[in-house]
Image (tube, helix red, strand yellow):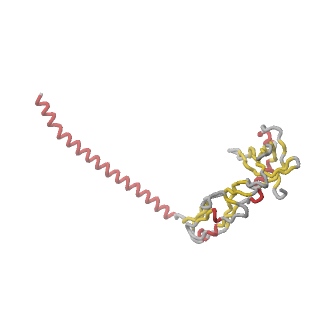
């Protein structure tokens, strides 16, 4: 446990009064875990931000409380929707002998020849993946070497990742991680727009032609109706 970052925490007497705590430069923490007692704690916001920046939400941190070390993971950080300030934090205490599942960020490294020499566009389908491992084996990031992509249209999959020993990815191995696609040039985009515009104009012309045909047919029908009904009206008048 001595190799992990440490966060000094203090006991919080009351579960409430979070606003008052933050005014004094502290943030409220909740420490919980399987088979352990929930603890209401506080930590200096500056110290916590430092630990969060370096450890992230998938690395073990030792919470120091009453001279004891609690191996925890920063499980959730709740922030203010407007200011972005940290409102409260959940720390999940783990057991070092039990496997855990965590989302681990992907780190894209290398240079793809399909991008550099063939003017391709790298499309990242995933930014993180879920892994299962013992706490001490969980990697901080998983590297994706895009130099393996040498052709336009080629993809990298979960199965192509170089996983550390004793780490299992929970995702489907056939899931696409990254693809290099052909770039659409301005000329091609303009051509597409023009084609789409031509299509609309064509439909418009066809619609106008059909409308004209209907109008002409209507005029003919009205003329026929007028010449056909007048004699009948006269005959009725004669009978009277």
Vertical placement of residue 3 versus 66, above or below: below
Foreground residue, 8 or 200?
A: 8
Q: Position of residue 88 (x, y in %)?
A: 75, 44
The residue lying toward the viewer, choosing from 152 and 160, is: 160
Q: Quadrant of the N terminus?
A: bottom right
Which residue is farthest left? 238
Q: Is residue 98 above or below residue 15?
A: below
Work out which residue is located at the far top of the displayed protein and give it: 240
Counting from the top left corner in percent of width and height, residue 161 is at 66, 64
- On screen, 209 above or below 173? above
On the image, the x and y values in percent for residue 20 come to: 79, 39
- Residue at coordinates 83% horizontally, 53% vertically from top-left? 6
* Residue 93 seen by the camera: yes
Tell me where residue 194 sits by quadrant. Answer: bottom left
Q: Is residue 202 left or right of residue 180?
A: left
**Residue 12 found in image quarter:** top right
């Amino acid at each position: 446990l001595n190799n992990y970052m440490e966060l000094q925490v203090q006991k919080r007497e009351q579960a409430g009064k979070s606003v008052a705590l933050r005014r004094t430069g502290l943030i409220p923490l909740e420490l919980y875990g399987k088979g352990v007692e929930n603890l209401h704690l506080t930590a200096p916001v500056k110290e916590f931000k430092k630990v969060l920046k370096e450890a992230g939400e998938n690395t073990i941190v030792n919470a120091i409380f009453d001279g004891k070390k609690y191996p925890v993971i920063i499980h959730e950080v709740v922030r203010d929707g407007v200011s972005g300030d940290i409102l409260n934090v959940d720390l999940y205490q783990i057991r070092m002998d039990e496997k855990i599942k965590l989302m681990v960020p992907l780190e894209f490294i290398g240079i793809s020849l399909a991008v550099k020499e063939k003017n391709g566009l790298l499309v990242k389908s995933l930014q993180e993946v879920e892994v299962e491992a013992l706490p001490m084996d969980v990697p901080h990031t998983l590297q994706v070497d895009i130099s393996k992509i040498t052709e336009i249209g080629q993809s990298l999959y979960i199965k192509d990742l170089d996983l550390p020993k004793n780490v299992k990815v929970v995702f489907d191995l056939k899931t696409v991680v990254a693809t290099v696609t052909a770039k659409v040039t301005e000329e091609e985009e303009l051509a597409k727009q023009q084609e789409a515009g031509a299509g609309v104009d064509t439909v418009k012309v066809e619609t106008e032609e059909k409308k004209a045909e209907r109008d002409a047919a209507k005029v003919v029908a009205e003329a026929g109706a007028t010449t056909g009904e007048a004699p009948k009206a006269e005959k009725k008048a004669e009978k009277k």
